[in-house]
Image: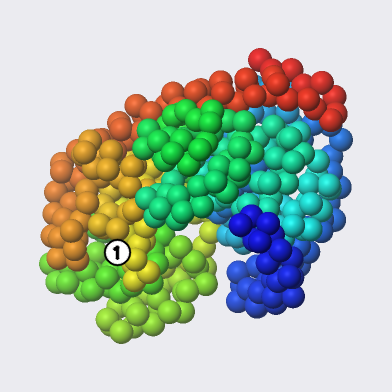
């Protein structure tokens, strides 16, 4: 099956190129860097040992930043290559990567393109984040016997059922990894059932993230502009959720005429669609990308910018995490960043992509699960008017994540053991 997949990808070269061009026109690829997606790189490999991190998109990229900092501080590795597959994650990396680390786009899983990638970068160590498993790349890494680890690994029930059908092929892919560190025991069991060895539970690395940054002057300006106004934040929204936010706002405005709703769409390019929804409900919207702070007569403040989630989590006492009520079936986004910044956190029922995190946080009272839009309206109204209730939920959220601060040390201990067995292509690297 793996050989058939490789043959199909090779035969599909023209289709893959057309797909990249189509995605580029839709804003889903960087038109100036399409060659990287085809395994061609202009940047020169730096001298000395090189660690390669692969993170699929924004969520995994956030976890990668945690490890890069620890790796540079605790080992001799300084040259860090980070690959991602989305434009949004690339922009995030370019803003937040430390000196010595750099971003490139991950090549599509074409056999020739992945060989070109590995020939060019010649990584000494591969650290693969979470759950995206590309067969051709992983097989090539295995053939070259490059030390590698799957970090913060997770596997949904849907993925497990899909992979189980091809268990023997999956085992061959997973054998690439010298080490697999999972988020939960359930994840570890799933990987083991698929034939993986060297599997252990480390916990979710996202708990060890540094709180999202923000510009203090901008935060001060926003606090001044919104002083004395009740406000809440709908974070990382998807299609369908902005309409819910507008309906909630229109209803709550009857008893809270000064209410401000802040919406940060997961994909800022949807700003025009969101503005049209606001008009549908006769709500005045202000786009952050046009500059300025919310005005007194603004109902909805659309945060259509990148890299400012830390700003709005700090500003907002109550937050609902997006893609838990969306029209695409949901899946949920990461609530940990909001918890670190002491928000009262709400979420919808569809959080299957992060079910372990949400289940644990719900049980601890660190988040509130909303059954439906009616429940959303009731809970939101109560939290916006009950300062003590909101404060209690905020404290539970921040306390919960504070209790998870040992996970980074567990992960780094395992990585350090792998590094000690890693022959470097450059100068000798010490671990300590």
Q: Residue at the spot x=84%, y=43% of the render?
A: 45
Q: Residue at the spot x=46%, y=54% of the render?
A: 165
Circle count: 1
Left or right: 269 with respect to 347?
A: right
Measured as percent of width and height from the top left, residue 181 is found at: 50, 32
Mark 1 residue crowding within 10 angstroms, few (<14) / some (14–19) / many (20+): many
Left or right: 168 with respect to 309?
A: right
Q: Residue at the spot x=15%, y=41% of the render?
A: 388
> Residue 231's quadrant in the figure?
bottom left
Image quadrant holding the N terminus, namely: bottom right
* Residue lying at the far top of the rendered structure: 432
Image quadrant holding the C terminus, namely: top right
Q: Is residue 60 above or below residue 111?
A: above
Measured as percent of width and height from the top left, residue 407 is found at: 45, 27
- Residue 318 in sight in this render: no
Task: Name the foreground residue: 76 vs 278.
Answer: 76
Location of mark 1 (residue): 325
Measured as percent of width and height from the top left, residue 26 is found at: 60, 76
Q: Is residue 335 above or below residue 324?
A: above
């Amino acid at each position: 099956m793996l050989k058939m997949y490789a043959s199909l990808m090779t035969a599909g070269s023209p289709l893959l190129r057309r797909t990249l061009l189509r995605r580029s026109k839709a804003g889903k690829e960087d038109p100036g860097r399409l060659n990287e997606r085809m395994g061609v790189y202009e940047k020169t490999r730096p001298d000395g040992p090189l660690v390669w991190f692969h993170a699929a998109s924004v969520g995994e990229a956030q976890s990668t930043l945690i490890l890069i900092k620890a790796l540079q501080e605790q080992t001799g590795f300084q040259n860090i290559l980070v690959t991602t597959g989305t434009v949004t994650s690339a922009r995030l990396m370019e803003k937040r990567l430390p000196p010595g680390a750099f971003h490139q786009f991950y090549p599509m899983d074409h056999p020739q393109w992945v060989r070109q990638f590995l020939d060019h970068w010649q990584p000494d160590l591969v650290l693969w984040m979470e759950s995206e498993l590309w067969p051709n790349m992983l097989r090539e890494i295995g053939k070259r016997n490059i030390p590698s680890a799957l970090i913060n690994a997770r596997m949904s029930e849907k993925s497990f059922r899909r992979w189980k059908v091809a268990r023997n092929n999956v085992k061959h892919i997973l054998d690439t990894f010298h080490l697999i560190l999972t988020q939960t025991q359930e994840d570890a069991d799933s990987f083991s059932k698929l034939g993986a060895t060297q599997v252990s539970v480390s916990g979710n690395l996202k708990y060890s993230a540094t709180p999202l940054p923000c510009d203090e002057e901008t935060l001060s300006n926003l606090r001044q502009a919104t002083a004395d106004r009740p406000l809440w934040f709908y974070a990382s929204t998807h299609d369908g959720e902005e309409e819910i936010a507008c309906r909630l706002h229109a209803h709550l405005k009857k008893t809270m005429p000064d209410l401000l709703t802040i919406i940060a769409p997961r994909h800022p390019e949807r700003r025009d669609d969101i503005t049209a929804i606001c008009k549908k409900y006769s709500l005045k919207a202000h786009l952050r990308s046009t500059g300025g702070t919310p005005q007194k007569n603004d109902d909805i403040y659309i945060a259509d910018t990148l890299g400012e989630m830390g700003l709005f989590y700090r500003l907002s006492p109550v937050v609902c995490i997006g893609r838990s009520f969306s029209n695409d079936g949901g899946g949920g986004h990461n609530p940990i960043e909001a918890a670190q910044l002491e928000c009262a956190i709400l979420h919808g029922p569809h959080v299957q992509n992060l079910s372990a995190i949400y289940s644990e946080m719900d049980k601890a009272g660190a988040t509130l699960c909303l059954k439906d839009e009616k429940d959303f309206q009731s809970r939101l109204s109560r939290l916006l008017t009950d300062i003590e209730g909101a404060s209690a939920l905020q404290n539970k959220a921040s306390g919960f994540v504070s209790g998870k601060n040992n996970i980074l040390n567990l992960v780094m201990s395992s990585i350090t053991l792998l590094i000690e067995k890693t022959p470097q292509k450059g100068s000798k690297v010490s671990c300590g």
